[in-house]
Amino acid sequence: MKTSKARFWLSVVGGILLIAAGVMFLLGNLNIITVEGDIIIGPLFAIGGVVFLLVFIVNTDNWWALIPAFALMAIGTIIFMDDALPAMADLWSGAVFLGLLSIAFLMIYIFHREQWWALIPGGVLFTLAGVSLISDTDYSGGVFFLGMAITFGLIYFLPKPSGKSKWALYPAGILLAIGVLVTLGEANVLNYVLPLALLIAGGYVLFRSLKK
């Protein structure tokens, strides 16, 4: 019953959108109104995303609809930003697309805990969204590894029908160590930590030798 309702509303809203787009382009070709493609196409993509979101709302078992829903809304937002706010689009377009797509996968997990695998693409995409905002800095590599470590950490800590996934601790720990080292290296802290560690180790060895 829910599936038939979802198909019904998808068909109705989709048909209305196609008719509205056709009328607007026809009026534009007749020079009755001025039609700028980007201003129309962007919202159409976004509305298309809302249609898929309604498919999910009508029946949450249709978790797959969240992926095209947020992907289309992201594309529509980027097209609109590129036309209305070009300066902002250059910086935020990648983060907007990756971030919204990340929300889709995270919502899949929130509504369907058995689909815990969605945490992995959700975390990866969210991390890449953050990295895209600081890609011109020296900390992008460290943020990437730390974000991946948090992703696998969440896989371990968050509830799942199968219980805790202990295997996730291994990649989480390794990625965390790499992220810390990369971040420290990019902040030039390791330039001081390594010599200091050698001085401490050498002093300890010398102290032990002289004491004996």
Image (spheres, helix red, strand yellow):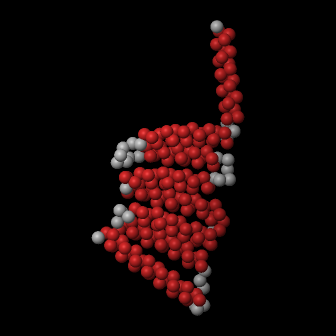
Q: Is residue 38 left or right of residue 11?
A: right
Q: Quadrant of the C terminus?
A: top right
Depth order, front residue of 168/90: 168
Q: Quadrant of residue 179?
A: top right
Relative image position of residue 149 (x, y in whole percent)? 52, 44
Q: Quadrant of the N terminus?
A: bottom left
Q: Residue furthest front?
A: 167
Q: How many numbered circles does the render carry?
A: 0
Q: Is residue 174 left or right of residue 89?
A: left
Residue at 53% of width from left, 66% of height from top? 74
Above or below 157: residue 3: below
Residue at 60% of width from left, 69% of height from top? 81
Relative image position of residue 135 (x, y in whole percent)? 65, 53
Q: Residue furthest top?
A: 212
Relative image position of residue 137 (x, y in whole percent)? 67, 50
Q: Is residue 102 visible?
A: yes
Q: Quadrant of residue 3?
A: bottom left
Above or below 119: residue 104: below
Relative image position of residue 64 (x, y in whole percent)? 42, 63
Above or below 27: residue 71: above
Q: Is residue 21 left or right of residue 55?
A: right
Residue at 57% of width from left, 56% of height from top? 129
Q: Residue furthest left?
A: 1
Q: Is residue 33 visible?
A: no
Residue at 63% of width from left, 47% of height from top? 141
Depth order, front residue of 178/138: 178
Q: Quadrant of residue 112?
A: bottom left
